[in-house]
Amino acid sequence: MRSAAEPATTELAARTRRKPQEPFRAPPAARRVLPRIVRPAALAVVGAGLWLLGRRLGYGAPEYLQLLVDGTVTGSVYGLVAVGFVVVYRVTGVINFAQGAFVMLGPMLTITFLGGIGVTGGVPLAAAAATAVVVTAGIAMAVHRFTLHPARQASALTRIIITVGVYISLQGLALRAWGPRPYVMPAFSTLQMEDRLLQVGGVVVQAQSLWVWAVGVVTVLGLILFFERTVAGKAMRACAVNRTAARLMGIRVDRMATLAFGLAGILGAVAGIVLAPSTRPTYDMGLELGLKGFVAAIAGGLTNLPGAVGGGLVLGILESLWAGVTVAGFKDLFAFVMLILLLLARPQGWLEAGHQ
Amino acid sequence: MTGEALLEVKGVTKAFDGLVALSNVSLQVRPGQIKGLIGPNGAGKTTLFNLIACCLAPTAGDIVFRGRSLVGLPPHRAAQLGIARTFQNVQVFPGMTVLEHVLVGLHRQARAGLLTAALHTVGVRRTELRLREQAEVLLDLLELTPWAGAPVEVLPFGLLRRVELARALAVQPKLLLLDEPGSGLNPTEKQAMSQLVRGLRDRGVTVFLVEHDMTMVMGLADEVAVLDHGALLCEGPPSKVQRDPRVVAAYLGEGDDA
Amino acid sequence: MTQPRWGPPWLAMAAVVAAVGVWELAQPGGLARLSRGLISTDLLIRTGLFTIVLVGLNLLMGYAGQASLGQAAFYGMGAFASAILTVRGRVLGIPQDLLAAWWWPWLVMGLAALAVGGFALVVGLAILRLRGHYLAMATLGLGIIVYIVLRENLGMPHLNLTGGFDGIVGVPRLRVGGAELWPVQVYYFVVWAVALTVVALGLGVVHSPVGRALRALHGSELATESVGVDVGRLKAKIFALSAALASVAGSLYAHFQAAVVPDTFGFVPSLELVVMSAVGGMSSIWGAPFGALTVLLLEQLLRTHVLGLLPAVSGELEPVVFGALLVVIMMFWPAGLVSSRKVQASPGSS
């Protein structure tokens, strides 16, 4: 994995780095050995703080339960996006900023395909969604093939800026294609704008939320099966562990990287599509969802699939609690503040933590 | 004995995520000596150097330099206190000339704040001229003058080791840590390097060095400490250490001395 | 006083800038007519403003090797500080005489730069410990946080200080004594006087021991620390400088545009700055004016010449072009960018 993150070495570097070194320097914060308890403890403190803020607003158990349930819905979406980050990062060593664009393309393409048919039933919706997922996966693979693959020798930072550029271009094209207005995606259960509301105890749940949970579970299970049971999945895992060894074993590492982008495209598109009925998709929805997915991925360790899902759920729940106690516009702040705090908690990065 | 030690490592243990790299190591470096540190690969030599240079903090134990504990200090503080170092895998600044490397070493004396630097005040320029003179003296000492204006990329490896040494000396160290100064050098260059290190000792710089080449270290060091598997195996004059059966055992089967 | 090495080119640049300004003053609009609407005083003022920001960004990214994908935030903080304290001063209880004084906006500009620089210093001490893409993501997050806070009225909607999405209109022109520094042809001189000063200061830093230390830490942080340089503080200081410069440019922008909206300082503008920096060449102070001018000209060319020829294309294609430009530059000319040297210089720690 480490070799993946390194750029083409100059002659000088090749001469000066002859053999792998023991880590000769830990960045400053690592000098203080952080016990493993810190992360859960910090999250608990944040949660308790939010809970107390809510108490001040007079929240009781039903309100908290409602916020919690709402949080798991958005959290599942964040988790799916986060898994997309993890899959790409493990195989290519790149933080794929364009992930957000895939999340946007899913629902926007679905709506476009539906527009051609007209909403008449569940079958067209499913067909449109499936087509959108496939097209997004294709776009994702093309992105890898034509931008990151040629630049595979470049440094990690150069490659992340490339993916940022790809994101901006895709969002710009989306603005061209669909304009700035929000769109409407029918709810899966009613096939209309209005969704069915289910009352469970004191908690109100949209029928769409059940779809989000179900699709989330099925997608992650499918992914796990793919990695455990298929040849391609095992090959990708091999690339994640050691690219050079994988190459020596005859695995086409570059193809696996393209495939990882395809998977990320599928995950992003699926996440966007299941979320769309309850949010009204726009051309720029990917920025927020992409970044929050990244935060979830970082929270989960960046190389760890269950961690990414867990990170997504935790982020979703905490954000929901935060949204319950703050002014509406500040809802999004939470994830970005958490991003910086999470990065600062382990300044040397999360990859190493996963591999030690 | 404690009173005269320049550097004192007291019962130092270092663990990386449970993996113990050094366990309860104690040793001393006295002023004016050349002390060698040897041991098989992975014995923890570089880890000990990084602890002394404050690039790492010990899990337990204390490191005292001129009566002052180094534990918890950032690396630049160690340098300011008089500990300079070179690196096993040479650390140079790509794109910068040999002279500039030495000038970076002298940076502490430049005393240029961001503002005075931006304004290019007379004071800054005057100091710069003085630093250049100092740098030229150092380049002369290390016989690097012909390459002063050359970017480091074009230099052969042997010279890069000397560039690092010049940069380290610019700090005007009391203690010089040399991490495998001979590695990557041919026999002639190694001899020249030994000569240089002896010359530095004669100028009052105390030297603590890690070296794989037994001939070089035994010929150079006044005293040698041996690490094996993170523990101090023995310590003493080269002649004694060479005959120590434990040292011989530790090195048996180790074929990478060259 | 000896003339610094960079003196003559700087004087030449100053002469060209002055000559263009005088010509525009004598013949307003002459430049636009000659270039068929491509170059205007407006465009040149923007070039000057971005030059100020980019000198700071190039010192940070090109010399010190620290990425910032949120630099527009500091630009925005300066702009909003100036706009709020000149337009909404009364809400904050600032006396009317003070607000009416000609020197008040200048004082605000200076204080804002200090405050933004101080803010960056504190933030920088923390986040500049991060490396490579982690630093990139953290600065990006920081930029978005600042953007949201500006957009959401600093969390105090009852005061309506930033004006939310719509921002603030009616920012006054700058004055000296009783004289207003306007029309644009006059303001051009104000902006470029600052920009040329900043270029000179940037060159001063680059050709000083500090510049040398910056390049050294770019090459190897480990080795730079080993000679006693407090790398963390140095990085934070250069981050603060770049933020303060961006703030000054933001203040000048507010008084130029007379209106500020948060969207000018969001995520995409931060990346536009990176594009300009990369186009001009990050490891060069001269790259700042060059990159700004090239990108702004390209934008203008797209707007007036290319897109005008395609009647079907009415929407904003700029982001697409920007994104594509960013991709192409990074794919084929990543040299000078931060990381290419950075990553290899710190093998063990990465």
Image (cartoon, rainbow, N blue to C red):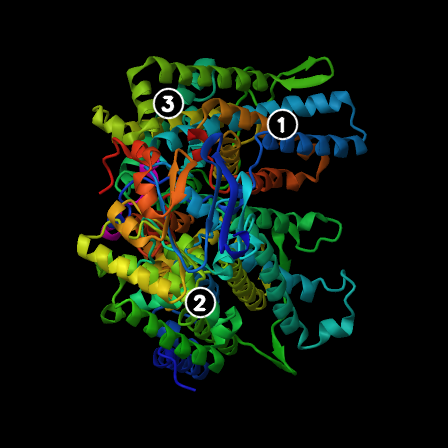
> Could you tell me which residue is drawn at 45 percent across and 59 percent down?
B31
Q: Quadrant of residue C283?
A: bottom left
Tell which subunit mark 2 falls on: B
Q: Quadrant of residue A351?
A: top left
A56 or A195: which is nearer to us?
A56
Which residue carries the number 3 mark? A131
Tell which subunit mark 3 falls on: A
Is residue A260 among the parts visible in the rendering? Answer: yes
Quadrant of the image containing the C terminus of chain A: top left
Q: Badge 3: few (under 14), some or many (20 or more) residues near its Cα, within 10 Å?
A: some
Q: Say whether residue C177 is magenta.
A: no
Q: Is residue B253 left or right of residue A264?
A: left
Which amino acid does the dot numbered 2 rest on?
Answer: His
> Could you tell me which residue is drawn at 37 percent across and 60 percent down?
C282
Q: Which structural element holds mark 3?
A: helix
Exactly how many numbered labels are in the figure? 3
Question: Residue lying furthest bottom in this view?
Answer: C1
Which residue carries the number 1 mark? A317
Q: Which structural element holds mark 1?
A: helix
The residues tagged by marks 3 and 2 sit, at their Cα atoms, a distance apart of 62 Å
Which residue carries the number 2 mark? B107
Q: Is the same chain shared between marks 3 and 2?
A: no
From the top left corner, tell me how far across and down residue C323 is, in percent. Answer: 38, 47
